[in-house]
Image (cartoon, rainbow, N blue to C red):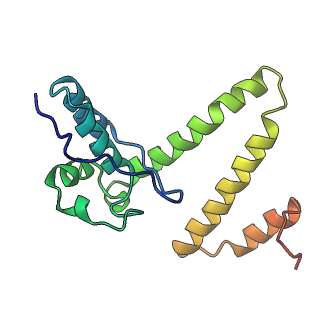
Amino acid sequence: MTTTHAVPLPASPPTPVLHTPPTAEQIEALTRILVDDRDPHRAAVLLHAVSHRTGAWSGEHLDDADPERAAIRALRRPPQDDLPAALLRIARAIDAETEILYHRQDLGHTDADPALRSIAFRVLELGFTIAEHGGVDARAIERAVAEAFDLPGHRPS
């Protein structure tokens, strides 16, 4: 059994950061560390490495030099190299946040409606931003949605 207690756990970020859920391969690797090596501290350090972008908030680039952290990060291929997996992760993230709300609606509760509307408009907003960066001019659609739903911050044309 090995321990890496000399390596400190990462400090909490001062501001919100992007969190990336681990892939199945990364979870398997972390599970092996927990079960076979019985090293929860090392697993926690590596979980942080797979869940947050390198140097996203720490200002340090020590993760780049750590071969174990680099190896576990490499288990997730970049989106451009595995677009179906990236799209599936996006769909699963949305499903994870909306499934319970759909279930409440199915039971006749209306308290999920505002949350679903908020999520829907946020996903639309993100979609318009992604479309713009992808070279798709969706301004007319964005304007029509904003006008149809009288969204704040939009001036009618």
Q: Position of residue 75 (x, y in %)?
A: 25, 47
Above-or-below relation of 105 to 144: above
Residue in the image at 67% along x and 71% along y? 138
Q: In which quadrant will I find the N terminus?
A: top left
Image quadrant of residue 60? bottom left
The answer to which of 65 and 149 lies nearer the viewer is 65
Residue in the image at 83% along x and 25% along y? 109
Q: Position of residue 81 (x, y in %)?
A: 31, 59
Total numbered badges shown on the rendered structure? 0
Q: In which quadrant will I find the C terminus?
A: bottom right
Residue in the image at 61% along x and 61% along y? 127
- Which residue in the rendered view is the most extreme toward the front? 6
Residue in the image at 46% along x and 56% along y? 13
Q: Position of residue 64 (x, y in %)?
A: 22, 62
Image quadrant of residue 58? bottom left
Above-or-below relation of 42 to 137: above
Question: In the figure, is residue 101 to the left or right of 79?
Answer: right
- Which residue in the rendered view is the most extreme toward the bottom? 157
- Which residue in the rendered view is the most extreme toward the left? 1
Question: In the figure, is residue 124 to the left or right of 43?
Answer: right
The answer to which of 150 and 58 lies nearer the viewer is 58
The answer to which of 61 and 141 lies nearer the viewer is 61
Q: Position of residue 105 (x, y in %)?
A: 78, 27
Image quadrant of residue 146? bottom right
Question: In the figure, is residue 147 to the left or right of 17?
Answer: right
